[in-house]
Image: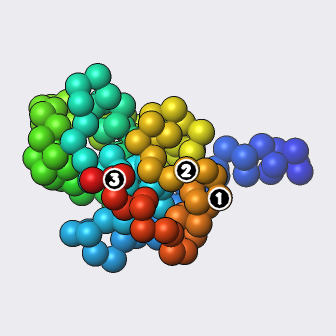
Amino acid sequence: MQRVQRQFKSLTRRPFEYRFNRAKDLARLQFPCAGAQAIWERHIEPGYRNNCAIRLASELRLLGLSAGECENKLLEWNDKNRVELSGAELGSVVRSAYLHRFPYRYSCRDALLRRYCPLKDENDCQAFAAGKSLPPPWRKSCQ
């Protein structure tokens, strides 16, 4: 009987509850990753646009945005920075980011994030993620 109860319990698991720190002001997003923040604030050249869009969509999901809000933010990014991706392409990116049960988190070791990251080393990256103040030059290289 105990074996059957254990099997039943494993089959009837509760859905996973996410604990996101939702951004209070969606008009002014602050990403925990300096590379993602740099991608958000600049024009992306062809060849990197889709890869940058999926990273932004994943970061927006980790910030607690719904799929619809994420798509709106990506459209805003697309218009603001003249990225020139179609709405259908951005919708496909959002569907990919929200497809799986658990959101994907790109790390600082990701080659694309390192390409756009203005921070010089991992200590600065950890300080940025923790919200500590950074030396002013990091902002200059983002723009």
Local SS, label 2: loop
Q: Which residue is mark 2?
A: 120
Alpha carbon separation for disc pair 1 and 3: 18 Å
Q: Earlier in the sequence, mark 1 or mark 3?
A: 1
The one nearer the camera, 46 or 102, is 46
Local SS, label 3: helix
Q: Amino acid at mark 3?
A: Cys
Q: Residue at x 37, y 65 (%)?
A: 30
Q: Are marks 1 and 3 in contact (CB under 8 Å)?
A: no
Q: 10 Å neighbourhood of mark 2: few (<14), some, or many (≥20)?
A: few
Question: Could you say which disc has been placed on residue 123 in the image?
Answer: 1
Q: Earlier in the sequence, mark 3 or mark 2?
A: 2
Extreme residue toward the top, this view = 47
Relative to 128, say whether 5 is above or below.
Answer: above
Q: Position of residue 142 (x, y in %)?
A: 33, 53
Q: Residue at x 41, y 42 (%)?
A: 116
Q: Position of residue 99 (x, y in %)?
A: 40, 38
| Left or right of residue 100: residue 72 | left
Q: Residue at x 55, y 50 (%)?
A: 120
Q: Amino acid at mark 1?
A: Asn
Q: 10 Å neighbourhood of mark 3: few (<14), some, or many (≥20)?
A: some
Alpha carbon separation for disc pair 3 and 2: 13 Å
Q: Which residue is mark 3?
A: 142
Q: Position of residue 141 (x, y in %)?
A: 36, 52
The one nearer the camera, 57 or 39, is 39
